[in-house]
Amino acid sequence: MKKHAIIYHEDYNKYDLGVDHPLIGDKPKNTMAFLKEKNLLSLFQVFTPKKATEADLLAVHDLSYIEHVKQLSQTGGWLSEDTPAPKGIFEIASLATGGSICAGEKLFEGFEITINPLGGFHHASKGHSSGFCFFNDIAITIEYLRKKHKLKRFLIIDLDVHHGNGTQDIYINDKTVLNISFHQDGRTLYPGTGRVETIGREDAAGYTVNLPFPPGTGGVSYLKAFKAIVPPITRQFQPEIILYQAGVDTHHADPLADLNLTYQTYYQLAKHIAELSKETCQKLLVLLGGGYNSIACINSYYNVICGLLGNKDFLEEEELPDTDPEQVQNTVNQLKQYLSEYWSL
Ligand SMILES: [Zn+2]
């Protein structure tokens, strides 16, 4: 049996928010084609997902919100200022969510790494959403697995350039879900949240971890920060599953954000996360999140997958300078300070 799985449906390209919108639908298809071209697809078993059921969605979202999306999906309209709701989006967003659930489920059927190339919709909260997201597939998958497999320790590592505000809203009081988000500083980027001092509430304090980076942060500083925070917390928490939101809108060519990561950084990050999974739970669910420069995005996802597999045939480009490594180091030190009661770092 193969050790890894990819979840894919040919309708994935219908998650497309229109010609003038940054979210175009062909990324999953192009990712699959590139993996095939590079002879990596044969290392994965490919599964076709089913749509998430309404009961699945209800484990996270309010009924009135689900009804609202359904209504928009019939007529077409806008979910929020930045998120058009094309006709049929309810079905497609349910399919994307079903893909993440399927990827989660496969980890309990013997697969060690599973990938949903249309996932990681971390801006969707219980009763509202924006940022191109309709349903929070990360949380819906967690709730599905919690119920079915009685899990108690979920780790989210969200490396998308945008803060995962929806996921944070859902789990800020829940210490069974340790939610680590690395993102561009909210003072300079949507959605504006994810401050270093936001660490979770009451007895879940220490289980929300936010590391904001200043614009211009490059791969060297980013990786250094990653190594200072993520491995020690992961080892102490001992997750039963890791959900990795592998957004690549941190790339220097991304049109929506201002970090300066390069292709090789994605390889390194994914490699570290795969090693942490191997060391702790052997269950790694990868959601290929944001990324809005078509070419950079497919190359970056490819490098994520090379990192997961330890495939040394990854792409490289010239490393870009870090604008303010001192600022990054200061924020890492602040974060360590805020978390010192909860984790030894
Ligand atoms: Zn993003």
Image (spheres, rainbow, N blue to C red):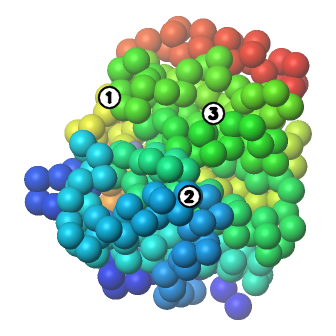
**For the point 32% across and 28% down, which residue is it?**
258
Mark 3 surroundings within 10 Å by alpha-carbon count, few (fewer than 14), some (14 through 19), many (20 or more)? some
Instruction: From the viewer's side, name the closer residue of 308 and 197.
Output: 197
**For the point 70% across and 26% down, which residue is it?**
199
Query: What is the tally of numbered marks visible in this picture?
Result: 3
Q: Where 71 falls versus 292 (above or below)?
A: below
Q: CA distance from mark 1 to mark 3?
A: 18 Å
- Image disc number at residue 258: 1
Reading the image, the residue beneath label 2 is 61
Q: Quadrant of ligand 1?
A: top left
Q: Is mark 1 within 8 Å of ligand 1?
A: no
Residue 253: percent from the left, percent from the top?
Answer: 26, 40
Mark 2 surroundings within 10 Å by alpha-carbon count, few (fewer than 14), some (14 through 19), many (20 or more)? many
The answer, for residue 31, to whether it is visible in the render is no
Residue 135: percent from the left, percent from the top?
Answer: 47, 60
Residue type pointed to by label 2:
His
Q: Quadrant of residue 187?
A: top left
**For the point 32% across and 68% down, which residue is it?**
71
Numbered disc 3: secondary structure: helix
Q: Is 75 positioned to the left or the right of 260 in the image? A: left
Mark 3 vs 2, N-terminal side:
2
The N terminus - image quarter: bottom right
Q: Is 220 positioned to the left or the right of 232 in the image? A: left
Reading the image, the residue beneath label 3 is 226
Q: Nearer the viewer, mark 1 or mark 3?
A: 1
